Image (cartoon, helix red, strand yellow):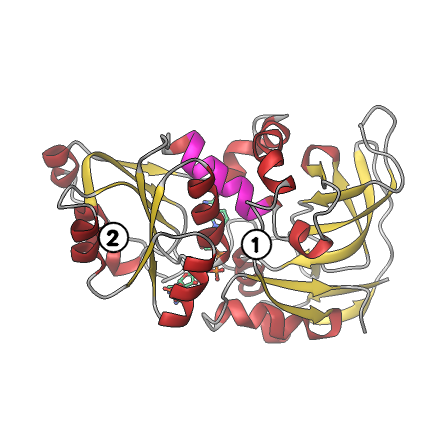
Amino acid sequence: MRAVQVVRLDGPEAVEVNEVEEPTAGADQVLIDVEAAGVVFPDLLLTRGQYQMRPELPFLLGSEVAGTVREAPDGSGFRAGDRVAALPVLGGFATTVACSTETVFPLPDGVSFDVGAGLPMNYLTAHFVLDTRAHLQPGETVLVHGAAGGVGVACIQFAKARGATVIAVVSSAGKGEVATAAGADHWVPVEGFKDAAKELTGGQGVDIVVDPVGGDRFTDSLRSLGDDGRLAVVGFTAGDIPTVKVNRLLLNNTSVVGAGWGAYASKRPGFMHRQWDAIRDDVANGRLAPPISATYPLAEAASAIGELAERRVTGKVVIHPREH
Ligand SMILES: NC(=O)c1ccc[n+]([C@@H]2O[C@H](COP(=O)([O-])OP(=O)(O)OC[C@H]3O[C@@H](n4cnc5c(N)ncnc54)[C@H](OP(=O)(O)O)[C@@H]3O)[C@@H](O)[C@H]2O)c1
């Protein structure tokens, strides 16, 4: 089969599309014929050797997919022909992938493969960040950084589905439009976002900040929080890992919470399936659905991943492994 292979750690432009052996399903694995694969930031980091997981070279790339079950173990709840979304973590940019039953999820009828391919990582992360870690309550205000990116859009949609008000922070008006289309009540530019957040909340500050970006905006994020506010640390797309002066937490009774979904879920069998059950109705009714910003054939995987590297993404980039 054809698959995207990382043969050296020189970034997205160095990935290769090669003919490799088709996988076979292990005892607890589902074999999936892939129709669409979502591109996520960790795919980019993996091409550079900058992700926490460092597979031995060469390895197959592709974290999340949607497609049709070809083979499934008895008692798994899946059978040949089922439409599914899945999180293989590696090997998803390929025509076929084998995936643990723990990370395969039924795709509701009417949800396209493109949308399905954008669900597992970012939407289960959004559920984890806002529900499990930041304890979002209806009526609260959530400020989302990197709001037109994959995690950002998922957090906007999840927060809106749970009855929150959302302030999106983005680097351009075009990205502001994407955030608004995703349901954000307001969008504000990165420059001056703290003052804008204060103004939009009548001086109170926001209840939750979702931060997949990090870098030099961190202190202003803390200053944007109201009493009992929570800042969820999700990622560092800006590159720098911020530090925090803890007196700021004491002064306003605020919390900084780490939100590392993969590490949490992988230690708790069944957790991802319970998360999927929690978002399933909103997936089925279309409230949780990544806007597809671009689709690429497998041969152009380097360009697809490059969109994330160049900060150009507005929504979800999807690869079609069966397209030439
Ligand atoms: N903690 C977890 O469990 C978890 C799970 C999934 C992903 N993540 C992490 O979350 C982060 C976001 O992932 P994503 O899929 O949403 O990525 P994405 O779609 O590429 O969006 C990232 C956003 O970050 C902003 N950004 C600021 N500086 C940037 C830079 N130098 N290069 C690229 N983007 C920059 C951009 O927004 P503006 O241009 O508007 O500033 C961009 O839209 C990544 O670090 C990823 O590893 C964490």
Dot in front, 2 or 1:
1
Whether residue 116 sits left or right of residue 185 in the image: it is right
For the residue labelled by badge 1, is the local secondary structure a helix, a strand or a loop? loop
The residue singled out by tag 1 in the image is: 290
The residue singled out by tag 2 in the image is: 218
Q: CA distance from mark 2 to mark 1?
A: 26 Å
Task: First in sequence, mark 2 or 1: give its number.
Answer: 2
Farthest residue toward the top?
75
Q: Position of residue 283 (x, y in %)?
A: 61, 41
- Which region shows up in magenta? 121-132
Q: Residues within 10 Å of mark 1 (few under 14, many from 20)?
A: many
> For this rendering, which residue is in front, 101 or 114?
114
> For this rendering, which residue is in front, 135 or 24?
135
Under mark 2, the amino acid is: Phe
**Residue 127 inside the magenta-drawn segment:** yes
**Residue 95 inside the magenta-drawn segment:** no
Most prominent secondary structure in the magenta stretch?
helix
